[in-house]
């Protein structure tokens, strides 16, 4: 797959989790990972110990996501 170019744009297609995670490696100072495992169980991990900081990060990202969705109208 050496001829594949990864574009950093918004897509309406699902992407493989490994591809998303590998694209974030060595770029982040803090990380929160949420997902669903192959058995359907929720998964959560964070490099940030303070729960309040984690919620703040999630809410900021949720706000940005909602703005992207709203701008499509």
Image: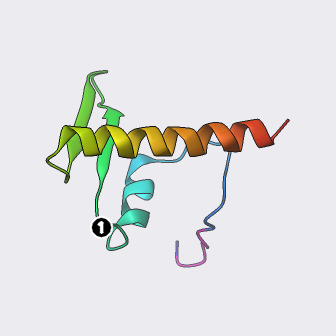
Above or below for 15 versus 42 = below
Which residue sits furthest right? 73
Which residue sits furthest top? 40
The image position of residue 9, as x and y in percent, is: 66, 60
The image position of residue 51, as x and y in percent, is: 20, 38
- Local crowd at mark 1 within 10 Å, few (<14), some, or many (≥20)? few
Magenta highlight range: 2-6
Using residue 5 as the reference point, say whether residue 54 is left or right of it. left
Q: Residue at x 56, y 40 (%)?
A: 63
Q: Residue at x 46, y 47 (%)?
A: 16
- Residue at which label 1 appears: 29
The image position of residue 13, as x and y in percent, is: 64, 42
- Count of picture labels: 1
Q: Residue 27 sits in which quadrant?
A: bottom left
Using residue 62 as the reference point, say whether residue 42 is left or right of it. left
Q: For this rendering, which residue is in front, 40 or 24?
A: 24
Looking at the rendered image, the quarter that the C terminus falls into is top right
- Res. 49 in view: yes
């Amino acid at each position: 797959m050496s001829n594949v170019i990864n574009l950093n744009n918004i897509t309406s297609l699902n992407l493989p989790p490994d591809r998303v995670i590998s694209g974030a490696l060595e770029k982040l100072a803090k990380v929160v990972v949420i997902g669903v495992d192959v058995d359907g169980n929720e998964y959560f991990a964070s490099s940030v110990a303070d729960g309040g900081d984690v919620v703040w990060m999630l809410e900021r990202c949720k706000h940005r996501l909602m703005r992207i969705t709203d701008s499509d109208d």
